[in-house]
Image (spheres, helix red, strand yellow):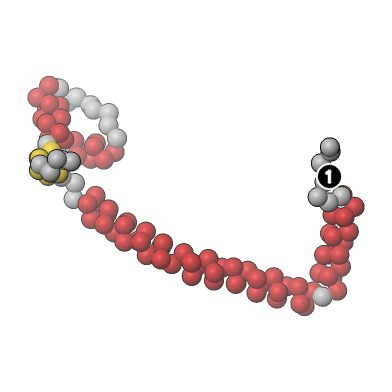
Amino acid sequence: WVAKPLCWPHELHDLAEAKAHVQRRWWFVDRPVRALIAVALLAAGVSRGKPYAKDFIKNCDEIAVHMSSPQLMFEANLKAGHRVIVDDYLRGYEWIRDNTPKDARVMAWWDYGYQIT
């Protein structure tokens, strides 16, 4: 058993020639139809993507609020329901302060570096 190709090269050539002929002969129809199809696809994409865009913007706004005022300590809930205070950042920064020279340089990612300085 040998798989047959979906189309032959001469069929592709004929299709390309027919397309070129339509473009030359019916140019005043070809371009507006292409523009109409593009506008329809764009409108469909925008209308279907609008709910996702609203959720994305809402999520970005919520994250921006939390990132705009970084905290060294915060409360968290454990799976068992207990509330704990997470002070890992504060302890880490205190360790750097207490165990490195005053003129030491610390390599860190930008957000931690921002807090360290």
Would you place residue 17 above or below residue 24 in this image? above
Would you say residue 72 is visible in this rendering? no
Image quarter of residue 44: bottom right
Q: Quadrant of the N terminus?
A: top right
Residue sitting at 48 percent across and 70 percent down? 47
Q: Residue furthest front?
A: 1
The structure residue drawn at horizontal position 37% and vertical position 59%, both measured from the top left corner, is 56
Q: Is 89 in front, or is 1? A: 1
Whether residue 28 can be seen here: yes
Left or right: where 35 falls relative to 86 = right
**Amino acid type, residue under disc 1 in the picture:** Lys
The residue labelled by disc 1 is 4
Residue 87, percent from left and from top: 12, 36
Direction bottom: furthest residue: 28
Residue 3: x %, y % from top left: 81, 41
Q: Is residue 100 above or below residue 38?
A: above
Residue 82 pos. (x, y %):
10, 41
Residue at image coords 60%, 72%: 40
Q: Residue at position x 87%, y 55% from top?
A: 11
Q: Quadrant of the C terminus?
A: top left
Asked where in the image residue 57 lies, by quadrant, the reply is bottom left
Instruction: Please provide percent x and percent y for residue 25.
Output: 86, 74
Residue 51 appears in which quarter of the rendering? bottom left
Residue 75 is left or right of residue 64, and the answer is left
Crowding around mark 1 (Cα neighbors within 10 Å: few <14, some 14 to 19, many 20+) is few
